[in-house]
Image (cartoon, helix red, strand yellow):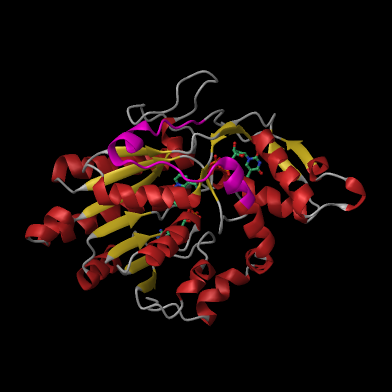
Amino acid sequence: MILVTGGAGFIGANFVLDWLAGNAEPVVNLDKLTYAGNAENLSALQGDKRHVFVQGDIGNYALVAKLLAEHKPRAIVHFAAESHVDRSIHSPDAFIETNVMGTFRLLEAALAYWRELQGEASGAFRFLHVSTDEVYGSLGPTEPAFTENHPHQPNSPYSASKAAADHLVRAYHHTYGLPVLTTHCSNNYGPYHFPEKLIPLMIVNALAGKALPVYGDGLQIRDWLYVTDHCAAIRRVLQAGRVGEAYNIGGNNERANIELVKAICALLDKERPLAGGKSYAQQITHVTDRPGHDRRYAINAGKIARELGWKPTETFETGLRKTVDWVLKNPQWIANVQSGAYREWIKKNYLGQVA
Ligand code: NAD
Ligand code: TYD
């Protein structure tokens, strides 16, 4: 069994769904169900005994200790976090509380648990920390992509809180020997992406006839990776990653935001043509830039390719088409998020054990 934290969020839910589709090993899924947690993402697992859902906080030491003692996982895969940069600028407190203090308390509980494990179970245990490329800071236009040796230079409260967590994870290995692994992934996109983030927001706003708000000149660059490729990389790192090491994960897909938004508009022009041959691109509106906005992220994923043989399977074109199609085919999911009904889902539907 493995313990996943944040498994009702965007990447965590994709990870749990993929894991259980390809692997009989059960999952304990600990998620607080903040605004970003959507238990409906896991509706396909209703009645599946391999999935134990527990609503709770990673910062609740007693709860985590109890779950570890009860389920005896061989690994913890730690996704739970506050993840939206814009929110971190307006209200950083929750980012410090969950990403720093929550990770600290989770590490404490994991360390106490791991110290009691004997023989093979002790050697096999892993704490996999899911981090981001944003901890490395911002690149100039011609600078080489981030390697794992790039210094941490976080610029937003979000990336600073993730960087703090990275340092704690590293220290728990160096000082106490906890068998940790850290991954730094670039921007993800795909199914179940909360529509406050760039790609789903643009698709949803375009279809609703609303403005498509591009921050500043829109020439900021992100390196996009389809979410199931990220999930496959995490599985591979968990399986064969070297203890104490960090692995960058990226899609080699650098795109300027404005280019990406135009690509979404072009896809929608084909899939859901507007009357009179108009383009969704007419809804693009440049708005005030995000304070401290990082100009460019790019990931060098050479280490994970060389050491573990992972590489992405989706191209940006196939991934973006799948993402647009998913939104078009799931209007109820979008409506439930927009109305807030998704927050009631867990109360109305059985999803296993709810603490
Ligand atoms: P998300 O915001 O969609 O989901 C986060 C999940 O964590 C939610 O289900 C939420 O309910 C849960 N959560 C929040 N605080 C919690 C707490 N205190 N205790 C328990 N659960 C809590 O985030 P995401 O986009 O799925 O990202 C998952 C992880 O991957 C994060 O650690 C993030 O930093 C990292 N990451 C994200 C991206 C990206 O592009 N989205 C890229 C690289 C790394
Ligand atoms: P986002 O999805 O918030 O991810 P991150 O900031 O973690 O990279 O934003 C991706 C890029 O899109 C980032 O450069 C900010 C920009 N952006 C906009 O231009 N408009 C928007 O409405 C949003 C949400 C983001």
Q: Residue furthest top?
A: 142
Q: Determine the residue positioned at 48% across, 32% down.
A: 155
Q: Position of residue 267 (x, y in %)?
A: 72, 47
Q: Residue furthest right?
A: 276
Q: Return the residue nearer the eye: 122 or 269.
A: 269
Q: Return the residue nearer the eye: 94 or 315.
A: 315
Q: Determine the residue positioned at 31% across, 34% down.
A: 306
Q: Considering only vertical position in the picture, is 62 above or below 172?
A: below
Q: Considering only vertical position in the picture, is 210 above or below 41?
A: above
Q: Quadrant of the C terminus?
A: bottom left
Instruction: Tell me the quarter of the picture where residue 198 sits.
Output: top right
In the image, the segment drawn in magenta is 297-321
Q: Determine the residue positioned at 33% across, 67% down.
A: 27
> Does the image show residue 97?
no
**Is residue 143 on the magenta stretch?**
no
Q: Quadrant of the N terminus?
A: bottom left
**Is residue 313 on the magenta stretch?**
yes
